[in-house]
Image (cartoon, rainbow, N blue to C red):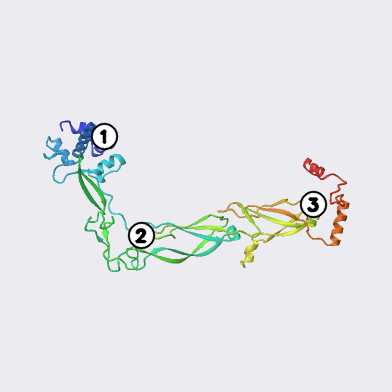
Amino acid sequence: MSQDLYELLGVSRDADADAIKKAYRRLARQLHPDVNPDPATQDRFKEVSQAYEVLSDPQKRAAYDRGGDPFGGAGFGGGAGQGFSFTDIMDAFFGGGAAGGQAGGQGRGPRPRQRRGQDALIRLDVELAEAAFGVTRELKVDTAVVCETCEGHGAAPGSSPQTCTTCRGAGEVAHVQRSFLGEIRTLRPCAACRGFGSVIPDPCRTCSGEGRVRSRRTLTVKIPAGVDNGTRVQLTEQGEVGPGGGPAGDLYVEIRVADHEFFVRDGNDLHCEVTLPMTAAALGASIRLPLLEADLVGEGKETDLETEVPLEVKAGTQSGTEQVLRGRGVPGLRGGARGDLVVTVAVETPQKLDSRQEALLRELAELRGEEQASDGSLQVHRKSVFGRWRDRFAH
């Protein structure tokens, strides 16, 4: 190689190791055979790689600066045990870095045995009143917990993990193969210790070396007021304990609200239907309307909450009329405003009449000009039905 190595990389002679590495990465992205397979470009890539191998090694660089042969006559990739690291090529494409800025790169080291556990999910069925006003429940959950025998270490009592003799605690082993680039060295997880850097010669018999076992336990969970179908309550670090006795994940309690026999929930509003006799709708009435709070009293829970309110039905109320009771719905989650209670009035028409009742209704119909002819047709002596509807909309 006759060209100056510094010129090949495009750096000055006083460039530091970081500048040399950045220059190599930039050129490698342009010249690597996987990007540009042209033969001339491949030769150029070999020269750039050879220049980087010399200038990134302090001893070889010093020998080159003194005018000596940095390869010792052995050519590219030669020398006693010297090889080109595949890590540097990967650095050029993925931005990785060797520890301490040294050529050849360093492995990631052993992976820890102790890792965070997974999150867990459990579903809880509650009544509408419990979802609205909150409830405290005890739950039985099956999750992984720390093994009490080995306290999460995985080794039998009296023993401990030993350094892996294959990787000498590194958790990785080097695999070397020759290519047109020279010796390419890659690091792979050690198969003997599975990348941990240590082995457990005498595993705990309770957990088989996992550091955790499955167990059923009881938790107390407080469901806040205002939850709805699908709401998830998070219990921090109450999920699965991780391998090696690692920290537990979180437990999520998903709420499922049962249907109510009287109320229907719509967001924070409650809807219900009150059926009134025809006479009550015509004459007006006052009724006592139960509230959702009544369910709490019905379950034997002590409460000073109001359980019913008066509902005034005006005379002449039509079927389908709605009345809104402000602030009688479901409390908002996390202290939000309480919703409303929407009451729909349904007027019930009697289906069976005795002779006296029928006579009275016929008399009423006659007085109102709504009596029927012998053939069953309606005789209207006052404003027609359509006329009354027209008058209603006119106002």
- Residue 196 x, y percent position in the rendering: 28, 56
What amino acid type is highlighted by mark number 3? Gly
Binning the other alpha carbons within 10 Å of mark 1 as few (below 14), some (14 to 19) or many (20 upward) gives: few
Q: Earlier in the sequence, mark 2 or mark 1?
A: 1
Binning the other alpha carbons within 10 Å of mark 2 as few (below 14), some (14 to 19) or many (20 upward) gives: many
Q: Are marks 3 and 2 in contact (CB under 8 Å)?
A: no
Instruction: Please tell me which residue lies in front, 73 or 16.
Output: 73
Q: Are marks 3 and 1 in contact (CB under 8 Å)?
A: no
What amino acid type is highlighted by mark number 2? Pro
**Extreme residue in the front direction:** 375
In three-dimensional space, the C-alpha distance between marks 3 and 2, rounded to whole angstroms, equals 72 Å
The reply to whether residue 14 is visible in this rendering is: no
Instruction: Please tell me which residue lies in front, 125 or 217.
Output: 125
- Residue 224 x, y percent position in the rendering: 55, 58
- Secondary-structure class at tag 1: loop
In three-dimensional space, the C-alpha distance between marks 2 and 1, rounded to whole angstroms, equals 46 Å
Q: Residue at x 12, y 37 (%)?
A: 69
- Residue 380 x, y percent position in the rendering: 86, 47
Q: Are marks 2 and 1 in contact (CB under 8 Å)?
A: no
Q: Which mark is residue 37?
A: 1
Quadrant in the rendering for residue 88: top left
In three-dimensional space, the C-alpha distance between marks 3 and 1, rounded to whole angstroms, equals 91 Å
Q: Which residue is mark 3?
A: 316
Instruction: Please tell me which residue lies in front, 132 or 258.
Output: 258
Q: Which residue is mark 2?
A: 243
Q: Residue at x 71, y 52 (%)?
A: 323
Quadrant in the rendering for residue 42: top left
Q: Give the left or right position of residue 206, taking residue 53 as reference.
A: right
